[in-house]
Image: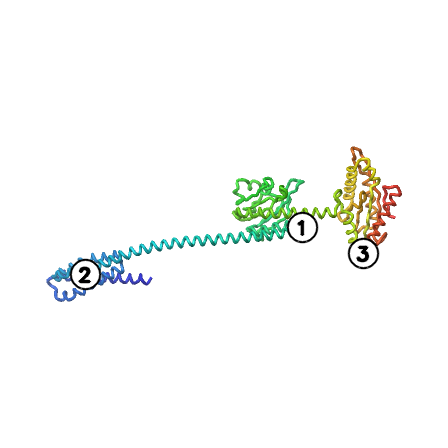
Amino acid sequence: MQNSKFKIASTLAAIIFFIIPLFIFIFSFSQAGIGDVGALDYIAPYALMFLCLGELLAWYGLGRAGGVTFFIASVPVVILASLSLRSFIYNFQILILAGIAVPSFLFYKQKNAILIETQEEAEDIQEEQNMLNARIKKGAELTKALTKKLDRYNKLKDLGESFNAKFSLGDIYQLTIERSCDIIGKTDEAKLFLVNDDANDLDFCARKISAKVQSRAKFSKSADIFDKWVFEKIQPLQVSDVTKDFRFDYRESGEKNQFNSLIIVPLIIDRRIAGILRLASMEAQAYAADDLRLLDFISDLSSAAIHNARLYIKTQELAIRDSLTGLYVHRYFKERLKEELTRCREAKDALSIVMLDIDHFKDYNDKYGHAAGDKVLKGITEIMRHNTKDANILTRYGGEEFVALFPGKDKEQTKAIAEHIRDKIQSASFMLRRQDTKVTASFGVAAFSVDASGDEELLKKVDFFLYQAKRQGRNKVCSS
């Protein structure tokens, strides 16, 4: 800025130093023969000196073009001065001006060459700097991407460890959708569906939504066209814009367009689809291909966790349930009986127990085979289930013996239930080797505190009543 001001001042001064001599010599020439030549002769050297000084300022202020122009314009002024003073010696002033112009011209020529070379070098340096900045930027972006991936992999590692610590299916379902949202982000709704093998359809299991869609998005537990596509194709799906994807006519399907982009992956267990995991965003183009691959990896971890939890539950069930009837086993029943007796003592509540034994069960096995005997056992189990409540504890106590625990029921209420079950068994028909066969059972009923106050004593009492019913002719309910 300061240099520009000096150049402007130099240019104005050069113009002034050119105009003054020009005015003087034009005036002198016009007054030739009239004016005082001696006075002009006195002024002329100073005027010509102004020309020299003006040329120097012109080279500085206007550069090479201005200096050359000033030199060419000064030549007629010098010639005019020599004519006015009637002395050709002043023409040597042209040589002085040339002496200023030639080195100045060469200086600017060299200067321009240096400037061009310097500019080219500066451009090369700038280009290298731009390339370096681009590499630095690319390196920073790569570092950021790698940091993000590392963070995601650490979260996946933590997720795997969290899955290993979970044995509850409900906890695994909720952990799956929560961590999916946390790891991938950009999600307004996460849903988990499980396959209903009986209906060959998807059943809603778990959901998580962001705060901004709680009042905007209409919640539906039904699977939509995208979920069903993944269920049928058994492959991952990414939709960047639901209104533009040619695979789905979303508008004509009649479904409200709540989300604009989504990614869905199947959950595979034993090479079969067990469910689908879905993330959706209200923004279009929200998910990248890496997000889909990451969600697919999360689904693998979740599938393994669900499979392990199901095996654990099945193992637990096998430990406490009879494999043939699905009823609780003898050992588990005794544990529950102790717990219920403790509760009844504290709450002063009633509790009754029923024990039944299938009449002449050995004859069915001998006559029709063990498969027929198993069919009878299953049939008796179904009759008991249909005529008792979920709160009751049903147990296969022995080979053909069953025990039912009725918390909250007194002896008379339980005896009425036993009579009802006995009647249902007596009325039922069992098809054994294509023969319509009737089955009966004998029952014993005992109650807490009325017949016994301890668990072993209560079991002995109900067993005594059962065999009393046997001795009285079978197909009876005995409680005293």
Disc 1 versus disc 3: nearer the observer: 1
- For marks 3 and 2 on the same chain, the one whose residue lies earlier in the sequence: 2
Q: Nearer the viewer, residue 334 or 275?
A: 334
Which residue matches tag 3?
A: 345
Say whether marks 3 and 2 touch (CB < 8 Å).
no
The type of residue carrying mark 2 is Ile
Percent from the top left, x then y, of residue 243?
A: 53, 43
Quadrant position of residue 434: top right
In the image, is 33 to the left or to the right of 334? left
Q: Which mark is residue 96?
A: 2
Q: Is residue 36 visible?
A: no
At a point 55% along the width and 51% down the height, the residue shown is: 186
Percent from the top left, x then y, of residue 20?
A: 20, 63
At a point 76% along the width and 49% down the height, the residue shown is: 391
Q: Which mark is residue 168?
A: 1
The type of residue carrying mark 1 is Ser
Above-or-below relation of 254 to 336:
above
